[in-house]
Image (cartoon, helix red, strand yellow):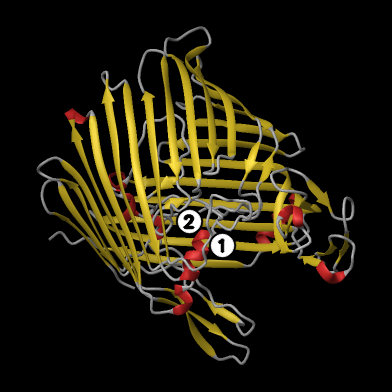
């Protein structure tokens, strides 16, 4: 394959970057995760074309020390993401889906204008992608995977009053080809987002006022907009949500989000912030941004005391307390938390912190995945971290956390690390971590049943989940010369999940459950690792099956990148990637067995060579 990258200085302050058919095989792979929540995992952008100048496209910078930071109107990982649709059905025997969407071309203009504006404009085009599959007769076919799509981002910012007042605006747009009905049913035809932001400083920048406002609008088929309404960000279909209006015939959805924060950012001892944030129910930016929640309002506060004069114990220390509250648009309190945090540097240059948190309990409008409200019990957490003297060639430390709730749930984790620098050009780091948790309300499934009147005609099935996670991250960075370097990353990961005490939510707005076979109904193994449940013991009329849930996930990701800059601006990359992954269903954790299982898992190796040649024209 071949591609072209262009970098051209239009003026001394404005730069044009363009790329045709770019390849980012030299970028380090993402770590593996097991996500059992209702929300998407966030991965940071690593690709050079999008990383360079990324600060210009950042919207809504705020100086708050404490906020619900979950709204990113431009998340470049959406461009070139894995395709949305894969072949499915009983006749699909084998399928080959592209790992990511090709970027046909992209262009980016960044810099400053003569009249003082900082601007950023980005446009990217991804083509129609198709997946190959074979049917039961061995015949090969193609099916749609991703439509032709154009992505646009425009950002402008102006510094006033010698940088003490900064105003800006942003516009994003996603437009998809609507020629394929299968894709139209799941993807929005177009998505628009626009916003303005403000940072205002006074008293020698010791105080700041930050504000931003974003509005969004998505359009598409009724099926696509219905999916948006039912997404985990909002769950319009909740049966007890009188403030939400689920309409399966709707073909557009609009909303807004905003922030207002006042902050004391400097001073001899005292600092702090008070922040209000708001996301209306219809706010949606995930076509080109990143957002986990809508239908939410939150207030965050923090008060801090800092001592920078060295004493008998600390070279410096900071003590702060902070609180967070959130409500949905019906006024239900969906989060409350209070924490006290002490951090500092000791006389021997070791760093550390300790934090204690208390959560008084709150309503949860996401736990039932679109069902009625439930509650989360009160609880607390303790976290501590220590880091050795960072000036030394060998550094070590780590963190430990324990948290609990009044229902018996807990999380315990330990994450040590060791970093060795035997020579200035070589660094080796080892960062293992182990985490044990028990969740007494892990969502499993929803089964419709008109007899479940207390939960609005649905049985919301949960289980107690004991989970163990072990990761053994290793990293090597070796710079042989200014032009020759090697980067190596390896992550063995083991995650086990043991589900037991299958149960259903007893009633809405409560953290109360009926365990099958104990509090209500009957339960029996189905011979395939799952269970047949008769929730009221009355026979098969409303009985249902819960498939096997236990898992042992084993993964290994290896990534090595050798980079040789054989002439200024031109480089040769040799990249090796290995991915091993397997899932079994024991549920319990056995270090020896599971670690051996990692290296016995099916393996995919990729060897890639990438050559770039810079033409100075």
Closest to the observer: 269 or 21? 269
Question: Do residues under tags 2 and 1 come within 8 Å of each other at their CB atoms?
Answer: yes
Q: Is residue 270 above or below residue 612?
A: above
**Which quarter of the rendering shows the C terminus?**
bottom left
Q: Residue at x 37, y 54 (%)?
A: 216
Residue named by callout 1: 579
Q: Where is residue 302 shown, x and y percent of the image?
A: 48, 24
Q: Where is residue 255 shown, x and y percent of the image?
A: 41, 52
Q: Where is residue 354 shown, x and y percent of the image?
A: 59, 24
Q: Is residue 249 above or below residue 503?
A: below
**Residue furthest out toward the front:** 242
Q: Quadrant of residue 333?
A: top right
Q: Is residue 164 above or below residue 612?
A: above
Q: Where is residue 197 shown, x and y percent of the image?
A: 30, 40
Closest to the observer: 311 or 356? 356
Q: Is residue 243 left or right of residue 81?
A: right
Q: Quadrant of residue 7?
A: bottom left
Helix, strand or loop at mark 2: loop
**Considering only order in the chain, which callout, 1 or 2, is on the residue closer to the N terminus?**
2
**Which quarter of the rendering shows the N terminus?**
bottom left
Report the disc number at residue 223. Answer: none
> Does residue 590 show up?
no
Closest to the observer: 406 or 561? 406
Separation of residues labelled 2 and 1 (CA atoms): 10 Å
Closest to the observer: 225 or 479? 225
Q: Quadrant of residue 414?
A: top right
Residue named by callout 2: 29
> Does residue 17 show up?
yes
Q: Residue at x 21, y 47 (%)?
A: 119
Label 1, residues with CA under 10 Å away: few <14, some 14-19, many ≥20: many
């Amino acid at each position: 394959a071949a591609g072209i990258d262009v970098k051209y200085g239009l003026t001394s302050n404005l730069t044009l970057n363009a790329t045709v058919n770019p390849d980012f095989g030299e970028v380090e792979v993402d770590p593996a995760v097991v996500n059992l929540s209702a929300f998407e995992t966030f991965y940071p952008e690593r690709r050079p074309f999008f990383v360079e100048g990324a600060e210009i496209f950042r919207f809504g910078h705020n100086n708050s020390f404490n906020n619900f930071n979950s709204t990113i109107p431009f998340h470049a990982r959406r461009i070139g993401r894995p395709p949305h649709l894969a072949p499915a059905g009983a006749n699909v025997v084998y399928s080959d889906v592209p790992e990511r969407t090709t970027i046909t071309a992209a262009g980016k203009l960044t810099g400053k204008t003569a009249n003082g504006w900082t601007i950023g404009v980005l446009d990217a085009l991804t083509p129609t992608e198709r997946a190959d599959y074979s049917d039961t007769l061995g015949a090969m076919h193609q099916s749609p995977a991703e439509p032709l799509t154009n992505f646009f981002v425009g950002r402008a910012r102006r510094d006033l009053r010698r940088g003490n007042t900064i105003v800006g605006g942003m516009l994003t747009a996603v437009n998809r080809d609507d020629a394929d009905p299968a894709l139209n049913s799941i993807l929005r035809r177009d998505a628009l987002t626009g916003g303005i932001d403000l940072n205002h400083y006074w008293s020698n920048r010791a105080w700041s006022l930050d504000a931003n406002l974003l509005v969004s609008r998505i359009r598409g088929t009724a099926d696509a907009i219905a999916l948006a309404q039912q997404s985990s960000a909002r769950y319009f279909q909740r049966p007890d949500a009188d403030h939400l209006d689920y309409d399966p015939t709707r073909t557009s959805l609009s909303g807004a989000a905003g922030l207002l924060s006042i902050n004391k950012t400097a001073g001899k001892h005292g600092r702090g912030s008070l922040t209000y944030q708001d996301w209306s129910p219809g706010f949606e930016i995930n076509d080109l941004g990143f957002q986990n929640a809508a239908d939410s309002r939150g207030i965050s506060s923090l008060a801090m005391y800092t001592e920078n004069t060295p004493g008998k114990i600390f070279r410096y220390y900071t003590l702060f307390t902070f609180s967070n509250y959130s409500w949905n648009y019906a006024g239900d309190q969906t989060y409350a938390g209070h924490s006290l945090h002490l951090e500092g540097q000791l006389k021997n240059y070791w760093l550390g912190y300790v934090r204690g948190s208390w959560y008084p309990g709150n309503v949860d409008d996401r736990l039932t995945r679109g069902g009625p409200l439930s509650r989360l019990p009160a609880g607390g957490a303790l976290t501590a971290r220590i880091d050795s003297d960072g000036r030394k060639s060998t550094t070590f430390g780590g963190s430990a956390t324990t948290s609990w709730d009044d229902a018996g749930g807990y999380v315990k984790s330990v994450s040590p690390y060791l970093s060795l620098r035997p020579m200035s050009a070589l660094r080796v780091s080892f960062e293992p971590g182990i985490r044990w948790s028990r969740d007494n309300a892990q969502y499993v499934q929803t089964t419709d049943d008109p007899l479940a009147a207390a939960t609005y005609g649905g049985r919301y099935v949960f289980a107690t989940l004991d989970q163990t996670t072990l990761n053994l991250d290793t990293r090597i960075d070796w710079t042989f010369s200014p032009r020759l370097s090697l980067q190596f990353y390896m992550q063995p990961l083991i995650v086990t999940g043991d589900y037991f005490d299958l149960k259903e939510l007893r009633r809405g707005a409560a953290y109360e459950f009926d365990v099958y076979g104990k509090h209500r109904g009957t339960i029996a193994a189905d011979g395939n690792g799952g269970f047949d449940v008769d929730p009221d013991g009355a026979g098969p009329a409303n009985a249902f099956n819960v498939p096997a849930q236990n898992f042992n996930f084993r993964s290994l990701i290896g990534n090595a990148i050798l980079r040789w800059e054989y002439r200024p601006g031109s480089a040769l990359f040799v990249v090796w990637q290995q991915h091993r992954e397997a899932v079994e269903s024991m549920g319990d954790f056995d270090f020896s067995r599971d670690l051996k299982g990692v290296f016995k898992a099916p393996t995919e190796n990729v060897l890639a060579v990438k050559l770039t040649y810079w033409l100075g024209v």
